[in-house]
Image (cartoon, rainbow, N blue to C red):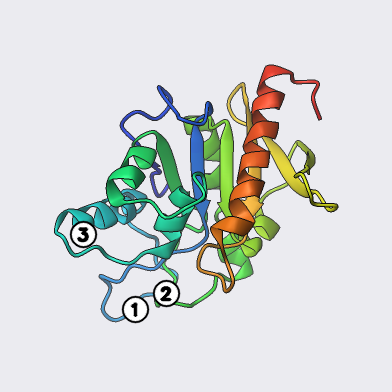
Amino acid sequence: MAVRPFRGKYYGEVSPFGLPILVLGEPSYNSEHHPCKRGELLPPDWNNRIIDCVRRSAASGKPEKDNTITRAAGVFYGEWRSWDQRWEFWQSSAFANFVQVDMGCHGQRPTDSEWEGGKGPFQEYLNELKPGFVLALGAALWGHLPPARGRGEVHKDGELEPKPYYLYDCGGGCSFVFGINHPISRRWSYATWTPWVEAALNTARLRRRNPLFT
C-alpha cells in the first residue's frame, strides 16, 4: 500500500471495546507543501504523522486543535477526552485515511478518480489489520466505499430508522464497517453519534460470536 496505516502499540492485543478498531478518515492535505501540491501522493508515514503531531502538540502544553482526531476517539466514550485518555485509545486502535493523495489545501474535496484510488489501499488495510470494527468518518466516504460482500442494519432504541453497516473480507476474517457523519460537520455531537456507535459495536460483537446473526 502507498500510505501506511497508523497502528497503535497494542493494536490487536487489547481493546476496551472487545474488537480491534480501525478509524477510517476521508482525505488529507500536507501543510508542509509550499505551495500546495494537489494530487501528489502523500508520504508513506502520513497517517502516523497525523496521530503523532497531535500527541507531540499535547505533550508540549500547546495542544493542536484537531476535531477529527479528538472526536473520533471521544465518540466511543460519549464525551471529550483528555489527551492521555485519547492516547490510551489510539495505543490499541488504528487509523488511516481512505484517499491516498494530497488535497493541496484545507477544504478541497477529492475527485471521483481520487476516491476510486482509495479502494485498493482500503482493502489492503483490512487484510493487514483485520479490524473487527471500522468507523468510517463522513457521508462522502461512506458513499465511495467499494462494494461489500454483505450488509445489514444497526438498530438503536428509540429510533425508528436503522442505519446500515457493511461487511468486508479481511484475509480470512470479516470486518464490520459502520459510518457516521464527519466529526467536523456542523451540528455534530457526541449525544447524537455515541449511541449509534455503541449500538453498532454491540451488533459487531454479536456477529462475531454468532455469524448467523443479522
Q: Which mark is residue 57?
A: 3
Q: Which badge, 2 or 3, comes first in the chain's sequence?
A: 2
Identify the mark at residue 38; answer none if there is no mark.
2
Q: Report the residue at 72% width, 41% height from top.
A: 166
Task: Name the residue at the left extreme.
Answer: 60
Which residue corresponds to mark 1?
Answer: 36
The x, y position of residue 13, in whole percent, is: 40, 22
Judged from the image, the secondary structure of the residue bearing numbered disc 3 is helix
Viewer-proximal residue among 90 and 113: 90
Q: Position of residue 30 (x, y in %)?
A: 33, 67
Give yes or no for contact between labels 1 and 2 (Cβ–Cβ under 8 Å): yes
The N terminus, quarter of image: top left
Identify residue type, mark 2: Arg
CB under 8 Å between discs 2 and 3? no
Q: Which residue is at the front of the view, 66 or 130?
A: 66
Please tell me which of labels 1 and 3 falls first in the chain: 1
Nearer to us: label 2 or label 3: 3
Disc 1 secondary structure class:
loop
Residue 106 picture quarter: bottom left
User: What whole-number distance in Å separates the C-alpha atoms at marks 1 and 3?
Assistant: 23 Å
Local packing at callout 2 (Cα closer than 10 Å; few below 14, some 14-19, many 20+) is some
